[in-house]
Image: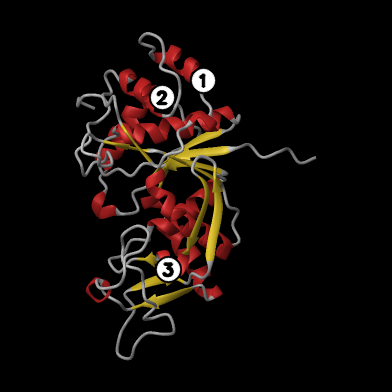
Amino acid sequence: MNLPAVPVGRFAPSPTGPLHFGSLVAALGSCLEARARGGRWLLRIEDVDAPRCRPEHAAAILRQLEACGFAWDGAVMVQSRRSGRYAEVLDRLKALGAAYPCACTRAELAGAPAGSDGAPVYPGACRDGLPPGRRARAWRLRVTGEIGFDDLVQGPQHQDLPRAAGDGVLLRADGPYAYQLAVVVDDADQGVDHVVRGADLINSTARQIHLQRALGLPTPQYAHLPVALDAAGRKLSKQTRAAPVDARDPWPALRAAATFLGMPAPAGRLAGTDFWQWAHIHWTLAGVPREKSLPARHPPPSASV
C-alpha cells in the first residue's frame, strides 16, 4: 500500500544581506502554509550567484530565523554545493536539444526590447547555431508558446514566453548556473509541491514551469504573496537598505508580518510560543490580500542581528 506523499514547502533566501521584513513575510507565509497542510517546511540558501552572496549573511539569516522561532525540517540545502547536480541537468537538456550555446554579449543585447521583468528579451541570434568565428559564452533554454497557471493568491496567470523573456540563460558567461535552472532542480530534488514566495518572482514562474516540463518534472502549486514596499514605494530589499529583523526581539516584526498577510491584529504583545500558537490558529492562505505589492505600514526599526 502506497502512503500519500507528505506535503513539502520551503523558504529559500539569498544571502546578499541579513533577513529583513520583506523576507520575513515570505518565511512566515511559507512556513504557516506548509504546517497548515500537515507538511514539512524546508530551508534552502540560494547562493548560486556567488559574487553577490556572502557566508556571513547566510549565518546571520539562520540566527535570525532561529530567534524568530522558525523550525525547519532536515538539513539546510546550499546551492553553492550543488554545481555537479546542475551540470548533470544541463547535460540532459543538451542531449534533449532543449539547450543551445550562445555567443552574445550583454552589449549586443542591450538594444533588445524589454520583457516582463525589465530585462532584454533574447532575440534568438544563436538559436540556429553559433555565428562563424564565435565561441559559446553561455547556454540558453529554448522556449515556445504560452504558459498558464493558477496562482493560489494572485489568480490565473498567463505568459507568452518568447515575447516576455525569450530563451533564458541556463549557464552564465561568468560561470554560475542561472537561478531558473537551480531553483527548478532544487524544488524537484527536495519534493517541494507548494511554492509560497513573494510576487516579485511571479514573472519567473512560467519559465520555471517550461523548464520543469522539458525535464519531465512535476510542477508545484504556486502562491505569490504581496511584496512589502517602503515609504517611497520601493520593494523592501537589501539594495534599498531595508532594516534587518532584530534577532534580540523579533516579535514586533513577526506580528507586523502576520497583519501584512491578512491575519487579524494579535491582541497584546504575543511572543514566543504564544505567537506561534496564535499564528497557526489564524493562518489561512485565502486571507492573504490578492495584491502584488502593499506598503509595509509597521516596519520594525533597524537593529543588530
Q: Is residue 54 left or right of residue 46?
A: left
Quadrant of the drawing holding the N terminus: top right
Nearest the viewer among 143 and 13 is 143
Please tell me whether mark 1 or mark 3 is closer to you in this view.
3
Q: Position of residue 92 (x, y in %)?
A: 53, 69
Residue at image point 52% right, 76% down: 97
Q: Which residue is mark 3?
A: 163
Q: Label 1 crowding class (10 Å Cα cut-off): few <14, some 14-19, many 20+?
A: some
In the rendered view, tell whether residue 151 sits above or below residue 129.
above
Disc 2 from disc 3: Cα separation = 37 Å
Residue at image point 24% right, 54% down: 51
Q: Which residue is mark 1?
A: 282
In the rendered view, tell whether residue 140 sits above or below residue 263.
below
Disc 2 from disc 1: Cα separation = 9 Å
Q: Position of residue 11 (x, y in %)?
A: 43, 38
Q: Which mark is residue 258?
A: 2
* SS at circle 2: helix
Q: Position of residue 212 (x, y in %)?
A: 55, 59
- Quadrant for residue 69, please give it: top left
Which numbered disc, 2 or 1, marks the residue that appears first in the sequence? 2
Q: Position of residue 86 (x, y in %)?
A: 45, 60
The residue most toward the top is: 268
Q: Amino acid at mark 1?
A: His
Looking at the image, do the residues carrying marks 2 and 1 touch, with CB atoms under 8 Å apart? yes
Q: Amino acid at mark 3?
A: Arg
Q: Label 2 crowding class (10 Å Cα cut-off): few <14, some 14-19, many 20+?
A: many
Looking at the image, do the residues carrying marks 1 and 3 touch, with CB atoms under 8 Å apart? no
